[in-house]
Image (cartoon, helix red, strand yellow):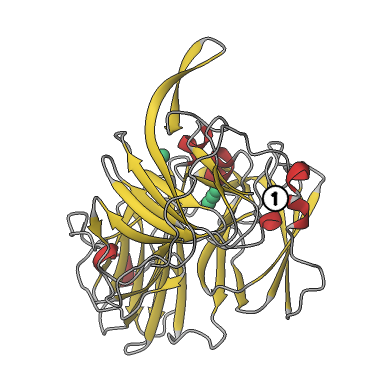
Amino acid sequence: LAAAGPTSSAGPASTAGTPDELGVDSLRTPADVAGPRKEFTLRAATETLTLASGDEVESWNYGALPGPELRVQQGDVVEVHLENVDVEAGVTIHWHGYDVPNGEDGVAGVTQDSVLPGESFDYRFVAEQAGTYWYHTHQNASRGVQRGLFGVLIVEPAGGIPERHDLVVPLHTIGDSVLLGTSDRPSGIGVPTGESVRLRLVNTDMLPTSFHLAGTPFTVVAVDGQDVASPTPVDGRALRLPAGGRVDLAFTMPDERVALTTDATASAWLALTPGQAASGPASGPASERPPDRSAEPELDLLAYGGGPAATLPAGPLVRAEMVLDRNPRFLQGVPVNGYTVNGAVYPQIPSITVDGGDVVELTVANRGWETHPMHVHGHHVLVLSRNGEPATGAPLLLDTFDVRPGEVWVVALVADNLGIWMDHCHNLDHAAEGMMMALHYR
Ligand code: C2O
Ligand code: CU
Protein backbone atom coordinates (compact mmCIF):
# COMPACT_ATOMS: atom_id res chain seq x y z
CA LEU A 1 0.00 0.00 0.00
CA ALA A 2 1.66 3.20 -1.18
CA ALA A 3 -0.35 5.57 0.96
CA ALA A 4 0.94 8.71 2.62
CA GLY A 5 -0.89 8.06 5.87
CA PRO A 6 -3.98 9.68 7.26
CA THR A 7 -4.49 13.27 6.27
CA SER A 8 -7.72 15.14 6.67
CA SER A 9 -11.11 13.69 7.33
CA ALA A 10 -14.29 15.67 7.59
CA GLY A 11 -13.85 19.39 6.98
CA PRO A 12 -15.69 22.17 8.74
CA ALA A 13 -19.48 22.10 8.75
CA SER A 14 -20.69 23.17 5.36
CA THR A 15 -23.71 22.64 3.22
CA ALA A 16 -23.24 21.30 -0.25
CA GLY A 17 -23.36 24.73 -1.90
CA THR A 18 -25.16 25.62 -5.09
CA PRO A 19 -24.36 24.25 -8.52
CA ASP A 20 -23.25 27.68 -9.72
CA GLU A 21 -20.77 28.23 -6.89
CA LEU A 22 -19.27 24.84 -7.55
CA GLY A 23 -19.17 24.90 -11.31
CA VAL A 24 -21.14 21.65 -11.51
CA ASP A 25 -22.52 22.82 -14.83
CA SER A 26 -19.02 22.50 -16.27
CA LEU A 27 -18.88 18.88 -15.10
CA ARG A 28 -21.03 17.56 -17.89
CA THR A 29 -20.43 15.27 -20.84
CA PRO A 30 -19.42 17.36 -23.85
CA ALA A 31 -22.05 17.34 -26.61
CA ASP A 32 -19.51 16.20 -29.19
CA VAL A 33 -18.12 13.26 -27.23
CA ALA A 34 -17.27 10.41 -29.62
CA GLY A 35 -19.29 7.20 -29.84
CA PRO A 36 -22.50 5.76 -31.26
CA ARG A 37 -25.62 7.57 -29.95
CA LYS A 38 -28.46 5.85 -28.11
CA GLU A 39 -31.30 8.30 -27.61
CA PHE A 40 -34.30 7.95 -25.32
CA THR A 41 -37.15 10.22 -24.28
CA LEU A 42 -38.70 9.70 -20.85
CA ARG A 43 -41.93 11.52 -20.03
CA ALA A 44 -42.69 11.72 -16.34
CA ALA A 45 -46.41 11.77 -15.65
CA THR A 46 -49.01 10.82 -13.10
CA GLU A 47 -51.19 7.86 -13.96
CA THR A 48 -53.82 5.66 -12.33
CA LEU A 49 -52.84 2.10 -13.16
CA THR A 50 -54.62 -1.22 -12.86
CA LEU A 51 -52.20 -3.99 -11.92
CA ALA A 52 -52.44 -7.65 -12.96
CA SER A 53 -54.30 -8.39 -9.71
CA GLY A 54 -56.93 -5.78 -10.55
CA ASP A 55 -55.64 -3.45 -7.84
CA GLU A 56 -55.48 0.23 -8.73
CA VAL A 57 -52.47 2.33 -7.84
CA GLU A 58 -51.76 6.03 -8.11
CA SER A 59 -48.48 6.06 -9.96
CA TRP A 60 -45.95 8.67 -11.01
CA ASN A 61 -43.75 7.12 -13.67
CA TYR A 62 -41.54 7.64 -16.70
CA GLY A 63 -44.17 6.32 -19.13
CA ALA A 64 -44.67 2.84 -17.66
CA LEU A 65 -44.36 1.00 -14.35
CA PRO A 66 -41.47 0.11 -14.14
CA GLY A 67 -40.09 2.75 -16.52
CA PRO A 68 -38.81 1.71 -19.95
CA GLU A 69 -35.80 -0.61 -19.84
CA LEU A 70 -32.85 1.36 -21.20
CA ARG A 71 -30.55 -1.16 -22.86
CA VAL A 72 -27.34 0.02 -24.48
CA GLN A 73 -23.92 -1.33 -25.41
CA GLN A 74 -20.68 -0.49 -23.70
CA GLY A 75 -19.14 2.52 -25.49
CA ASP A 76 -22.48 4.02 -26.52
CA VAL A 77 -23.20 7.66 -25.83
CA VAL A 78 -26.49 7.56 -23.92
CA GLU A 79 -28.68 10.63 -24.44
CA VAL A 80 -31.85 10.83 -22.40
CA HIS A 81 -34.35 13.60 -22.85
CA LEU A 82 -36.49 13.98 -19.71
CA GLU A 83 -39.78 15.82 -19.88
CA ASN A 84 -42.04 16.42 -16.93
CA VAL A 85 -45.66 16.34 -18.05
CA ASP A 86 -47.51 16.85 -14.75
CA VAL A 87 -45.55 15.63 -11.73
CA GLU A 88 -46.01 18.66 -9.47
CA ALA A 89 -43.33 17.56 -7.03
CA GLY A 90 -40.73 17.81 -9.82
CA VAL A 91 -38.47 15.09 -11.20
CA THR A 92 -34.88 14.34 -12.16
CA ILE A 93 -33.05 11.19 -13.25
CA HIS A 94 -30.27 9.77 -11.12
CA TRP A 95 -28.28 6.88 -12.62
CA HIS A 96 -27.99 4.59 -9.63
CA GLY A 97 -24.61 2.86 -9.59
CA TYR A 98 -23.43 4.58 -12.76
CA ASP A 99 -20.34 6.72 -12.35
CA VAL A 100 -21.43 9.56 -14.63
CA PRO A 101 -19.87 13.06 -14.67
CA ASN A 102 -21.22 15.07 -11.74
CA GLY A 103 -23.40 17.38 -13.84
CA GLU A 104 -25.32 14.34 -15.16
CA ASP A 105 -25.95 12.82 -11.70
CA GLY A 106 -29.50 14.11 -11.39
CA VAL A 107 -29.48 15.29 -7.76
CA ALA A 108 -32.01 18.09 -7.45
CA GLY A 109 -30.64 21.04 -5.50
CA VAL A 110 -27.04 19.91 -5.93
CA THR A 111 -26.20 19.01 -9.53
CA GLN A 112 -29.28 20.51 -11.18
CA ASP A 113 -32.63 22.10 -10.45
CA SER A 114 -35.68 19.93 -10.15
CA VAL A 115 -37.54 19.61 -13.49
CA LEU A 116 -41.04 21.03 -13.02
CA PRO A 117 -44.16 20.34 -15.12
CA GLY A 118 -43.61 21.67 -18.65
CA GLU A 119 -39.83 21.66 -18.24
CA SER A 120 -37.21 19.29 -19.57
CA PHE A 121 -33.58 18.26 -19.03
CA ASP A 122 -31.14 16.38 -21.24
CA TYR A 123 -28.71 13.86 -19.78
CA ARG A 124 -25.71 12.54 -21.64
CA PHE A 125 -23.06 10.06 -20.58
CA VAL A 126 -20.74 7.50 -22.10
CA ALA A 127 -21.67 3.95 -21.13
CA GLU A 128 -18.23 2.93 -19.91
CA GLN A 129 -19.28 0.35 -17.29
CA ALA A 130 -21.15 -2.78 -18.38
CA GLY A 131 -23.72 -4.33 -16.06
CA THR A 132 -27.07 -3.99 -14.32
CA TYR A 133 -28.04 -0.54 -13.02
CA TRP A 134 -31.20 1.42 -12.50
CA TYR A 135 -32.41 4.98 -12.69
CA HIS A 136 -34.79 6.94 -10.52
CA THR A 137 -35.87 10.43 -9.57
CA HIS A 138 -33.73 12.29 -7.02
CA GLN A 139 -36.30 14.96 -6.27
CA ASN A 140 -38.71 14.14 -3.49
CA ALA A 141 -37.23 10.69 -3.96
CA SER A 142 -38.88 8.77 -1.15
CA ARG A 143 -42.34 9.51 -2.54
CA GLY A 144 -41.39 9.69 -6.22
CA VAL A 145 -39.50 6.41 -6.43
CA GLN A 146 -42.08 4.54 -4.40
CA ARG A 147 -44.82 5.74 -6.76
CA GLY A 148 -42.88 4.48 -9.74
CA LEU A 149 -40.34 7.01 -11.02
CA PHE A 150 -37.71 4.38 -11.75
CA GLY A 151 -36.54 1.94 -14.42
CA VAL A 152 -33.65 -0.38 -15.22
CA LEU A 153 -30.48 0.51 -17.13
CA ILE A 154 -28.66 -2.42 -18.75
CA VAL A 155 -25.28 -1.92 -20.36
CA GLU A 156 -24.25 -4.95 -22.39
CA PRO A 157 -20.51 -5.59 -22.50
CA ALA A 158 -18.82 -4.86 -25.82
CA GLY A 159 -18.68 -8.58 -26.68
CA GLY A 160 -22.24 -9.34 -25.46
CA ILE A 161 -23.10 -11.58 -22.52
CA PRO A 162 -22.35 -15.31 -22.66
CA GLU A 163 -25.89 -16.34 -21.72
CA ARG A 164 -28.56 -16.93 -24.35
CA HIS A 165 -31.52 -15.56 -22.35
CA ASP A 166 -31.33 -12.30 -20.45
CA LEU A 167 -34.16 -11.72 -17.95
CA VAL A 168 -34.45 -8.52 -15.94
CA VAL A 169 -36.54 -8.66 -12.77
CA PRO A 170 -36.94 -5.51 -10.73
CA LEU A 171 -38.77 -5.82 -7.41
CA HIS A 172 -40.93 -2.87 -6.43
CA THR A 173 -43.50 -2.08 -3.77
CA ILE A 174 -46.12 0.55 -4.58
CA GLY A 175 -48.73 1.10 -1.92
CA ASP A 176 -49.81 -2.35 -0.78
CA SER A 177 -48.81 -4.04 -4.04
CA VAL A 178 -45.53 -5.75 -4.83
CA LEU A 179 -44.40 -6.08 -8.43
CA LEU A 180 -41.91 -8.73 -9.46
CA GLY A 181 -40.96 -7.56 -12.93
CA THR A 182 -44.09 -5.92 -14.30
CA SER A 183 -46.67 -8.00 -12.45
CA ASP A 184 -48.02 -8.31 -8.92
CA ARG A 185 -49.18 -11.84 -9.82
CA PRO A 186 -47.31 -14.99 -10.91
CA SER A 187 -45.75 -14.81 -14.35
CA GLY A 188 -44.16 -17.46 -16.48
CA ILE A 189 -41.68 -17.78 -19.28
CA GLY A 190 -40.60 -20.79 -21.31
CA VAL A 191 -36.91 -21.60 -21.71
CA PRO A 192 -35.63 -24.62 -23.65
CA THR A 193 -33.81 -27.17 -21.49
CA GLY A 194 -30.04 -26.89 -21.68
CA GLU A 195 -29.95 -23.20 -22.63
CA SER A 196 -28.14 -20.62 -20.52
CA VAL A 197 -29.99 -17.92 -18.62
CA ARG A 198 -28.94 -14.69 -16.94
CA LEU A 199 -31.33 -13.35 -14.34
CA ARG A 200 -30.80 -9.75 -13.28
CA LEU A 201 -32.41 -8.98 -9.92
CA VAL A 202 -32.91 -5.35 -8.91
CA ASN A 203 -34.23 -4.25 -5.51
CA THR A 204 -35.87 -0.86 -6.04
CA ASP A 205 -37.53 -0.92 -2.61
CA MET A 206 -36.51 0.87 0.57
CA LEU A 207 -36.00 -2.31 2.57
CA PRO A 208 -33.70 -5.27 2.03
CA THR A 209 -35.31 -8.40 0.72
CA SER A 210 -34.21 -11.93 -0.07
CA PHE A 211 -34.70 -13.72 -3.36
CA HIS A 212 -34.77 -17.49 -3.76
CA LEU A 213 -34.19 -19.59 -6.85
CA ALA A 214 -35.54 -23.12 -6.68
CA GLY A 215 -35.01 -25.91 -9.17
CA THR A 216 -31.42 -25.34 -10.23
CA PRO A 217 -27.97 -24.52 -8.87
CA PHE A 218 -26.79 -21.09 -10.00
CA THR A 219 -23.77 -18.81 -9.89
CA VAL A 220 -23.71 -15.15 -8.89
CA VAL A 221 -21.91 -13.61 -11.86
CA ALA A 222 -22.18 -9.91 -10.95
CA VAL A 223 -22.99 -7.78 -7.93
CA ASP A 224 -23.98 -4.12 -8.37
CA GLY A 225 -23.07 -4.42 -12.04
CA GLN A 226 -19.49 -5.55 -11.37
CA ASP A 227 -18.43 -9.03 -12.47
CA VAL A 228 -17.51 -11.52 -9.73
CA ALA A 229 -14.11 -13.19 -10.17
CA SER A 230 -14.42 -17.00 -10.41
CA PRO A 231 -18.08 -17.49 -9.45
CA THR A 232 -18.82 -20.94 -8.05
CA PRO A 233 -22.20 -22.72 -8.21
CA VAL A 234 -24.46 -22.65 -5.16
CA ASP A 235 -27.84 -24.19 -4.50
CA GLY A 236 -30.46 -23.44 -1.89
CA ARG A 237 -29.03 -20.09 -0.80
CA ALA A 238 -31.03 -16.91 -0.26
CA LEU A 239 -29.80 -13.78 -2.00
CA ARG A 240 -30.38 -10.81 0.20
CA LEU A 241 -30.31 -7.54 -1.74
CA PRO A 242 -30.00 -4.19 -0.03
CA ALA A 243 -32.38 -1.43 -1.07
CA GLY A 244 -30.99 -0.31 -4.42
CA GLY A 245 -28.74 -3.37 -4.87
CA ARG A 246 -28.49 -5.74 -7.83
CA VAL A 247 -27.18 -9.24 -8.50
CA ASP A 248 -26.90 -11.14 -11.78
CA LEU A 249 -27.35 -14.92 -11.61
CA ALA A 250 -26.54 -17.46 -14.29
CA PHE A 251 -27.66 -21.05 -14.70
CA THR A 252 -28.44 -23.68 -17.32
CA MET A 253 -32.12 -24.42 -17.77
CA PRO A 254 -32.89 -27.88 -16.33
CA ASP A 255 -35.73 -30.12 -17.50
CA GLU A 256 -38.00 -29.03 -14.67
CA ARG A 257 -39.50 -25.77 -13.47
CA VAL A 258 -37.28 -23.06 -11.97
CA ALA A 259 -39.05 -20.65 -9.62
CA LEU A 260 -37.90 -17.23 -8.50
CA THR A 261 -39.57 -16.04 -5.31
CA THR A 262 -38.97 -13.20 -2.90
CA ASP A 263 -39.66 -12.69 0.78
CA ALA A 264 -41.26 -9.36 -0.12
CA THR A 265 -44.46 -11.05 -1.35
CA ALA A 266 -46.15 -14.41 -1.58
CA SER A 267 -48.43 -13.25 -4.42
CA ALA A 268 -45.91 -12.78 -7.21
CA TRP A 269 -43.24 -15.13 -8.51
CA LEU A 270 -41.55 -15.91 -11.77
CA ALA A 271 -41.73 -19.46 -13.13
CA LEU A 272 -39.38 -20.61 -15.87
CA THR A 273 -40.75 -23.71 -17.53
CA PRO A 274 -38.76 -25.96 -19.84
CA GLY A 275 -40.04 -25.63 -23.38
CA GLN A 276 -40.88 -22.97 -25.91
CA ALA A 277 -43.86 -21.34 -24.18
CA ALA A 278 -44.18 -17.59 -24.52
CA SER A 279 -43.93 -15.25 -21.56
CA GLY A 280 -47.04 -13.98 -19.84
CA PRO A 281 -49.21 -14.64 -16.83
CA ALA A 282 -48.39 -17.99 -15.28
CA SER A 283 -50.68 -20.81 -16.34
CA GLY A 284 -50.59 -24.58 -16.10
CA PRO A 285 -47.78 -25.94 -13.92
CA ALA A 286 -46.14 -22.49 -13.78
CA SER A 287 -49.08 -21.20 -11.76
CA GLU A 288 -48.56 -23.76 -9.00
CA ARG A 289 -47.32 -21.87 -5.98
CA PRO A 290 -43.65 -22.60 -5.18
CA PRO A 291 -42.89 -23.66 -1.60
CA ASP A 292 -41.94 -20.95 0.89
CA ARG A 293 -38.15 -20.73 1.06
CA SER A 294 -37.78 -17.88 3.52
CA ALA A 295 -35.80 -20.13 5.90
CA GLU A 296 -33.08 -20.72 3.29
CA PRO A 297 -29.62 -19.72 4.59
CA GLU A 298 -28.25 -16.50 3.15
CA LEU A 299 -25.34 -16.48 0.70
CA ASP A 300 -22.59 -14.28 2.17
CA LEU A 301 -21.39 -12.30 -0.82
CA LEU A 302 -18.36 -11.05 1.14
CA ALA A 303 -17.07 -14.62 1.21
CA TYR A 304 -18.20 -15.60 -2.31
CA GLY A 305 -16.36 -15.85 -5.58
CA GLY A 306 -12.70 -16.42 -4.73
CA GLY A 307 -9.94 -14.43 -6.38
CA PRO A 308 -7.27 -12.20 -4.86
CA ALA A 309 -7.89 -10.50 -1.52
CA ALA A 310 -9.14 -6.92 -1.54
CA THR A 311 -6.34 -4.41 -1.04
CA LEU A 312 -6.44 -0.65 -0.95
CA PRO A 313 -5.47 1.02 -4.21
CA ALA A 314 -2.48 3.40 -4.13
CA GLY A 315 -2.91 7.10 -3.42
CA PRO A 316 -2.85 9.61 -0.55
CA LEU A 317 -5.08 8.17 2.17
CA VAL A 318 -8.00 10.08 3.65
CA ARG A 319 -9.90 8.48 6.51
CA ALA A 320 -13.52 9.35 7.11
CA GLU A 321 -16.24 8.02 9.34
CA MET A 322 -20.00 7.80 9.15
CA VAL A 323 -21.71 6.88 12.40
CA LEU A 324 -25.35 6.14 11.66
CA ASP A 325 -28.03 6.57 14.28
CA ARG A 326 -31.47 7.87 14.95
CA ASN A 327 -31.70 10.82 17.30
CA PRO A 328 -34.33 13.30 18.28
CA ARG A 329 -33.79 16.77 16.87
CA PHE A 330 -35.87 19.90 16.99
CA LEU A 331 -37.59 21.64 14.13
CA GLN A 332 -38.91 25.05 15.19
CA GLY A 333 -38.99 23.80 18.75
CA VAL A 334 -40.84 20.57 17.95
CA PRO A 335 -38.94 17.33 18.59
CA VAL A 336 -38.85 15.01 15.59
CA ASN A 337 -36.81 11.92 14.88
CA GLY A 338 -33.90 12.49 12.59
CA TYR A 339 -31.71 9.88 10.97
CA THR A 340 -28.25 11.10 11.77
CA VAL A 341 -24.74 10.77 10.42
CA ASN A 342 -22.07 11.71 12.98
CA GLY A 343 -24.78 13.17 15.19
CA ALA A 344 -26.23 15.59 12.66
CA VAL A 345 -28.83 15.62 9.90
CA TYR A 346 -28.20 16.72 6.32
CA PRO A 347 -27.35 19.46 5.35
CA GLN A 348 -25.72 20.13 8.74
CA ILE A 349 -23.45 17.10 8.37
CA PRO A 350 -19.85 18.08 7.62
CA SER A 351 -18.85 16.91 4.14
CA ILE A 352 -16.00 14.55 3.41
CA THR A 353 -13.51 16.74 1.57
CA VAL A 354 -11.05 15.16 -0.85
CA ASP A 355 -8.58 15.95 -3.57
CA GLY A 356 -8.62 14.10 -6.88
CA GLY A 357 -6.48 10.97 -6.56
CA ASP A 358 -7.07 10.49 -2.83
CA VAL A 359 -7.99 7.07 -1.54
CA VAL A 360 -10.84 7.46 0.90
CA GLU A 361 -11.09 4.81 3.56
CA LEU A 362 -14.60 5.09 4.93
CA THR A 363 -15.70 3.45 8.17
CA VAL A 364 -19.47 3.14 8.44
CA ALA A 365 -20.86 2.15 11.85
CA ASN A 366 -24.52 1.54 12.57
CA ARG A 367 -25.43 2.42 16.15
CA GLY A 368 -29.17 2.22 15.53
CA TRP A 369 -31.64 -0.64 15.38
CA GLU A 370 -32.59 -0.43 11.72
CA THR A 371 -30.66 -1.53 8.65
CA HIS A 372 -29.15 1.32 6.63
CA PRO A 373 -28.41 0.53 2.98
CA MET A 374 -25.59 2.99 2.30
CA HIS A 375 -25.32 4.26 -1.26
CA VAL A 376 -22.37 6.14 -2.71
CA HIS A 377 -22.84 8.33 -5.77
CA GLY A 378 -20.30 8.63 -8.57
CA HIS A 379 -17.90 5.99 -7.23
CA HIS A 380 -17.81 2.32 -6.36
CA VAL A 381 -16.48 1.21 -3.01
CA LEU A 382 -14.21 -1.73 -2.42
CA VAL A 383 -15.26 -3.66 0.68
CA LEU A 384 -12.29 -4.18 3.02
CA SER A 385 -13.95 -5.58 6.12
CA ARG A 386 -17.14 -6.07 8.06
CA ASN A 387 -17.06 -6.14 11.85
CA GLY A 388 -13.27 -6.44 11.78
CA GLU A 389 -13.38 -9.54 9.53
CA PRO A 390 -11.65 -8.94 6.21
CA ALA A 391 -13.76 -9.69 3.12
CA THR A 392 -12.46 -13.07 1.94
CA GLY A 393 -14.36 -13.54 -1.33
CA ALA A 394 -13.86 -11.90 -4.70
CA PRO A 395 -13.05 -8.20 -4.24
CA LEU A 396 -16.50 -6.65 -4.15
CA LEU A 397 -17.05 -3.28 -5.74
CA LEU A 398 -20.39 -2.04 -4.56
CA ASP A 399 -22.47 1.09 -4.82
CA THR A 400 -24.97 0.04 -2.14
CA PHE A 401 -24.29 -2.03 0.98
CA ASP A 402 -26.47 -2.96 3.91
CA VAL A 403 -25.09 -1.89 7.25
CA ARG A 404 -27.18 -3.84 9.73
CA PRO A 405 -27.70 -2.84 13.36
CA GLY A 406 -24.40 -2.94 15.23
CA GLU A 407 -22.31 -3.53 12.11
CA VAL A 408 -19.13 -1.68 11.16
CA TRP A 409 -18.01 -1.74 7.53
CA VAL A 410 -14.70 -0.44 6.22
CA VAL A 411 -14.75 0.38 2.52
CA ALA A 412 -12.43 2.30 0.21
CA LEU A 413 -12.98 4.43 -2.85
CA VAL A 414 -10.69 6.24 -5.25
CA ALA A 415 -11.52 9.92 -5.61
CA ASP A 416 -11.51 9.99 -9.41
CA ASN A 417 -14.74 11.77 -10.30
CA LEU A 418 -14.75 15.49 -9.61
CA GLY A 419 -17.79 17.17 -8.10
CA ILE A 420 -20.18 17.00 -5.19
CA TRP A 421 -21.58 13.57 -4.53
CA MET A 422 -24.24 12.32 -2.17
CA ASP A 423 -23.53 9.38 0.11
CA HIS A 424 -26.76 8.40 1.79
CA CYS A 425 -29.04 5.77 3.17
CA HIS A 426 -31.14 4.21 0.39
CA ASN A 427 -34.02 3.71 2.71
CA LEU A 428 -35.19 6.92 1.10
CA ASP A 429 -37.37 7.79 4.07
CA HIS A 430 -34.22 7.81 6.20
CA ALA A 431 -32.42 9.94 3.61
CA ALA A 432 -35.32 12.40 3.61
CA GLU A 433 -34.98 12.63 7.39
CA GLY A 434 -31.32 13.55 7.24
CA MET A 435 -29.19 10.44 6.63
CA MET A 436 -27.24 11.95 3.76
CA MET A 437 -23.72 13.30 3.53
CA ALA A 438 -21.76 14.99 0.76
CA LEU A 439 -18.39 13.97 -0.64
CA HIS A 440 -16.88 17.19 -1.84
CA TYR A 441 -13.82 17.73 -4.03
CA ARG A 442 -11.64 20.73 -3.21
CU1 C2O B 1 -30.38 5.49 -5.84
CU2 C2O B 1 -28.98 8.94 -4.20
O1 C2O B 1 -29.73 7.28 -5.02
CU1 CU C 1 -31.31 4.13 6.80
When asked about the image quadrant of residue 254, the answer is bottom left
Looking at the rendered structure, the kind of residue marked 1 is: Ala
| Vertical arrangement, residue 441 with respect to residue 331, above or below | below
Looking at the rendered image, the quarter that the N terminus falls into is: bottom left
The one of 174 and 12 positioned closer to us in this rendering = 12
Residue at 59 percent of width and 54 percent of height = 355
In the picture, measured across the screen, residue 320 lies left or right of residue 113, that is: left
Which secondary structure lies at badge 1?
strand
Q: Position of residue 62 (x, y in %)?
A: 65, 54
- Which residue is located at x 76 percent, y 47 percent? 85
Residue identifier under label 1: 44
Q: Residue furthest top?
A: 333
- Residue 226 point in image, percent of width and height: 44, 71
Indicate if the residue with disc 1 has its beta carbon within 8 Å of ligand 1.
no
Determine if residue 299 is in view: yes
Left or right of 317? Residue 305 is left
**The quadrant where residue 27 appears:** bottom right
Near-viewer residue (18 or 4): 4
Residue 374 in the image: state x and y as whole percent: 43, 48
**In the displayed structure, would residue 303 be above or below residue 228?**
above
Tell me residue 287's x, y (percent).
32, 65
Name of the residue lying farthest toward the front = 4
Q: Is 226 in front, or is 314? A: 314
Give the residue displayed 27% in from the left and 53% down from the top: 386
**336 and 119: which is toward the camera:** 336
- Binning the other alpha carbons within 10 Å of mark 1 as few (below 14), some (14 to 19) or many (20 upward) gives many
Vertical order, 73 against 387 (above or below): below
Residue 288 visible, this orientation: no
